[in-house]
Image (cartoon, helix red, strand yellow):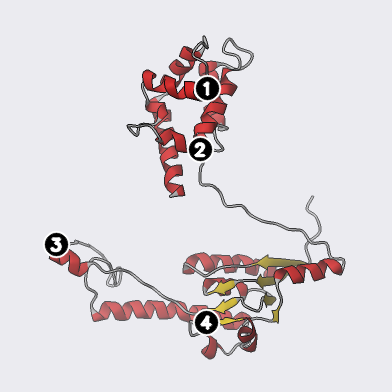
Amino acid sequence: APGPQPEEVVLLLRSPGGSVTGYGLAAAELLRLRHHNPPVKLTVCVDELAASGGYLMACCADRILCSPFAAVGSIGVIATIPNAAKRLEREGLNFIETTAGKWKRTVTPFRVPSEEDLAKQKEDISAVYRQFSTFVHKFRPHVDIEKVATGEVWYGPDAIERDLVDELKTSAQYLLELMQEGVEVYSVSFKASSGQQGLLARGADSGLLKDLLQRELGSGSTPGGGMLDRLREFIGGLAPGDFLGRPDGRPMFLAEEERLAPQILASGFQETDASLSDMRAAMRRLQPEVKQRLLEELLASESTRL
């Protein structure tokens, strides 16, 4: 059964901002604490930075604490896009674009924008700016929004002077004070996903890959006993980087027998293993679509790291 509702949520926030939609959603999720029945107090601690979208999130809090040199503010909107139209013209390249709707596309990298295009872009940015500044003023009503919604950034004392934050205090100091008062403090953190999913998720622990290899090699209770565990360990040691290290760039799962054998031997298998040929044969019998999925996931995991 669910436990008791927390009296307060302390969010340690560090953000330079980013997309309008992403930070708008993050702010909306934080507001769920204030709209909960009964409401849950939200305190945001800014030890280093809460700018632009980061401050949009921070102002959802009942209280904002910041360290003396934390940077706060940057209430504004910016949109940048490179323009290669003149270079394309010199190269004799034309970019053909078909749209329906007068303002479906305004400023693009591929043609010189007209004054009308630029005016429309400015109008769109101004609409976002008005929503941003109105949102801040709604949750920080004592702020002189005309003076702070300029895109400027202020540090701790100056931020307090402009009512952007409520108190100069680090998160460590605040949490320590709560614990000294006898408050039970629980830490919750989220670890970003490595981005590697599917057949090779967490090395070779995928259930699909395990079942496939069990059918081909058997498990400890079958004639191929012990080989499955050794092969999974072997695959886990290679994934994802070593699969892409073949001299001809071909992954091991698509390699021919004479290329596969040295890779297995190099990972600790003895050439005298009577079951080695069975292992190589099983690898070659992987269905083409499974091979392709493995290859796609390996390539995706490699590009994620770059």
Q: Nearer the viewer, mark 3 or mark 4?
A: 3
Instruction: Tell me the CA gap for discs 2 and 3.
Output: 43 Å
Residue underneath mark 3: 91
Instruction: Tell me the CA gap for discs 3 and 1.
Output: 54 Å
In the depicted view, which residue is nearer to us: 210 or 173? 173
Helix, strand or loop for disc 4:
helix
- Answer with mark 3 or mark 4, whichever residue precedes in sequence: 3
Residue underneath mark 1: 213
Instruction: Tell me the CA gap for discs 4 and 1.
Output: 58 Å
Q: Give amino acid for label 4.
A: Ser
Instruction: Tell me the CA gap for discs 2 and 1.
Output: 15 Å
Q: Quick check: 169 left or right of 208?
A: right
Q: Give amino acid for label 1.
A: Leu
Residue 198 circle label: 2
Helix, strand or loop for disc 3:
loop
Q: Position of residue 132 (x, y in %)?
A: 51, 78
Residue 133 circle label: 4
- Answer with mark 3 or mark 1, whichever residue precedes in sequence: 3
Q: Position of residue 45 (x, y in %)?
A: 67, 71
Q: Residues within 10 Å of mark 4 (few under 14, many from 20)?
A: some
Circles 2 and 4: CB atoms closer than 8 Å: no
Q: Give amino acid for label 2.
A: Gly
